[in-house]
Image (cartoon, rainbow, N blue to C red):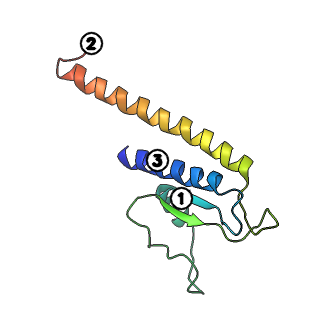
Amino acid sequence: MENALNASVLRQKTTASNIANADTPGYKAQKTVFQHALDEEETKLSARRTSDYHVHFSEHSNGQAYVSESRGTTYNHNGNNVDIDKEMSSMAENQIYYHSLIERMNSQFNSIRTAIGKGR
């Protein structure tokens, strides 16, 4: 639960940074990658690195979220690739996810409180 909350906070910071830099020339949007999603997909892949620019499959094996930069696209004439509509949607989705994690954590704490006789 802690890793999920930390990943959600990192995603919020990354999205906020993208939104803040939507008009910055040459800025490349960043994306928070949740490791558990990569781990699930990695088990389905048989891959090998053919370039030093490729991501190492075991590089982020600590179960944490990390930030990657999207360089393959350009939405604006100034080299910026931030899609503001996508970023706003991502932020709203992340806020819902974060609040659901908080609710789940509060529920677990209340269960523990009840189990030790200090519940409501």
Is label 2 in a helix, a strand or a loop?
Answer: loop
Q: Residues within 10 Å of mark 2 (few under 14, many from 20)?
A: few
Q: Is residue 34 left or right of residue 50?
A: left
Residue beneath label 3, please?
9
Sequence-first tag of 1 and 3: 3
Q: Is residue 5 above or below residue 46?
A: above
For residue 59, side relative to residue 54 (left or right)? left
Horizontal side, residue 16 vs residue 77: left or right: left
> Residue 73 at what x, y percent from top left?
75, 68
What's the distance in space between the residues labelled 1 and 2, CA to CA?
Answer: 39 Å
Q: Which residue is mark 2?
A: 120
Q: Earlier in the sequence, mark 2 or mark 3?
A: 3
Relative to 6, say whether 77 is above or below: below
From the viewer's side, name the closer residue of 58 and 64.
64
Secondary structure type for disc 3:
helix
Farthest front residue?
24
Tell me which amino acid carries mark 1.
Val
